[in-house]
Image (cartoon, rainbow, N blue to C red):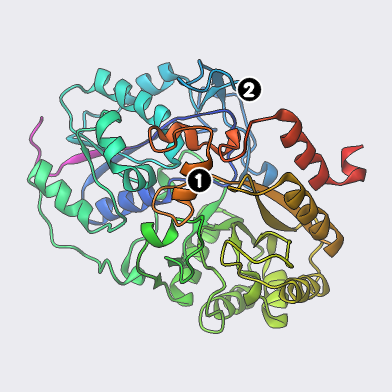
Amino acid sequence: MKSRPVPRILLVNPWIHDFAAYDFWARPLGLLTIAAVLREHKIEVDYLDCLNRFHPKAPPSNPNARRGRGPYLKTRIPHPGGLTDIPRHFCRYGIDPEWFKEDLQAVPEPDLILVTSSMTYWYPGLQETIQLLRQVYPEVPILLGGIYATLCRDHAEAVSGADRVFPGTDILNILDLIAEYTGYSVEPRFDPNAPDTWPDPALDLQQTIPFAPLLTSRGCPFACAYCASRFLEPNRRVRSPKRVMAEIRHWHEGHGVDDFVFYDDALLVDSDHHMIPLLRAVIDSGMEVRFHTPNAVHIREISEELADLMRTAGFTTLRLGLETAAFEEESRLDRKVTEAEFKKAIGRLLRAGFDAGAVGAYLLAGLPGQTLKAVADSICIVRESGVTPVPAYYTPIPHTDLWDRARAVSRYDLGADPVFTNNALLPCWPEFSWEIVSYLKNLARGPSESA
């Protein structure tokens, strides 16, 4: 390893291997935050994104189309072992491996490589990424972090190919790791328990910034049976509305970004002190921006005032966390909302000026013991309410309350390999069927859209 007064760190966002993948406002926010922390401490940083839709060698693509979303480049590859019977194409999503190799050879040799991870069942793409990194830089240590590394640490240590797996979300640890591997030691210039002191994520490392992800809070006060948020972020930490507003202004005025995407797990909690002041600041600024919430917001928190402010501030895509509309049944998921609360919230949103195309309610499908009829009935109830039903296929996740039940009913050995938890397989239903998936999609679209 080369010795430098100041180390050079390469950060890499890996490929996805899956049956389907789409850039639905997805960015490696944790990795880009680490990049910002490193730069804040005068460490040299390079960033390569295997999912880059705007790579110089990729076909031209308008970053403003679809409000920043869009399809990844993809290449068909063989199915993973154990999934050869699934009648769907399996693909590598992201740039051509030769492009990645050329990009690696174009950056100075790093002292350390940091690779992130997301969905647990995407780890084969991570393996391929690390294998190629080894070919180009065989002597450089590779460290793996992120969601897969945290939820499936033992598996990641066994198969990822990384020299070290570091779980968790404490960004202060990264400075300790830099010191351990490079000898470069600095005093932190921020407080890991005070998010207002953290630098803005280094979105400028991207070749194109079609949207800006926003994380105004970490952690969630709820404990849904299917969700690992409490395991990934045990402590809730909230940024001030003033600090978030400064970040929005920075990307909008300094980089021309109009679309902002909230990544919070509990965006509307304590809205009197958090979201309402932020929305008022946005409105008072006169900025013409758009906000999107691909992560579900909690329906119970939507007041008349909040609905009006969201609409006025520029909320364009709003997703609600409904889970199921089988209100008469005893909830197995610690349901967050009653039928009356759901209808009241929908009424408030519609009166504020939202339409069915802007508001969607996530409905879980593929749960252990759930019937197709229960999902279909929920879809119909949501459509009748005046908003759009959005089927969300269940992914079994380790360290959640539903994990043991999912393992007991799945037709796969979920504990043996995370690849079997892929929600595209409907792993906790008796069988995979294209007819089931098509039926639910068409039902959610409604008769006029399906015709």
- Callout 2 amino acid: Arg
Residue 353 lies, in percent from the top left, at 81, 69
Q: Nearer the viewer, mark 2 or mark 1?
A: 1
The crowding category of the residue bearing disc 1, from other C-alpha atoms within 10 Å (few below 14, some 14 to 19, many at least 20), is many
Q: Position of residue 175 (x, y in %)?
A: 18, 53
| Image quadrant occupied by the N terminus | top left
Residue that appears at 40% across and 32% down:
417
Which amino acid does the dot numbered 1 rest on? Ala
Q: Is residue 51 visible?
A: no
Q: Is residue 88 magenta?
A: no
Secondary structure of the residue carrying tag 1 is helix
Q: Is residue 363 left or right of residue 74?
A: right
* CA–CA distance in space, label 2 to label 1: 23 Å
Percent position of residue 379, x then y: 78, 53
- The answer to which of 23 and 63 lies nearer the viewer is 23
Dot 2 or dot 1, earlier in sequence: 2
Magenta stretch: give its range. Answer: 1-11
Q: Quadrant of the C terminus?
A: top right
Residue at the disc numbered 2: 88
Q: Which mark is residue 406?
A: 1
266 lies above or below 411: below
User: Closest to the observer: 332 or 52?
Assistant: 332
Query: Is 338 placed left or right of 116 in the picture?
Result: right
Which x, y percent locates residue 120?
42, 40
Residue 6 in magenta stretch: yes
Question: Can you see residue 126?
Answer: yes
Q: Bin the neighbour count of mark 2 within 10 Å (Cα to Cα): few under 14, some 14-19, many 20 and up.
A: some
Q: Is residue 15 left or right of residue 389?
A: left
The residue drawn where x is 70% and y is 47% is: 371
Most prominent secondary structure in the magenta stretch?
loop
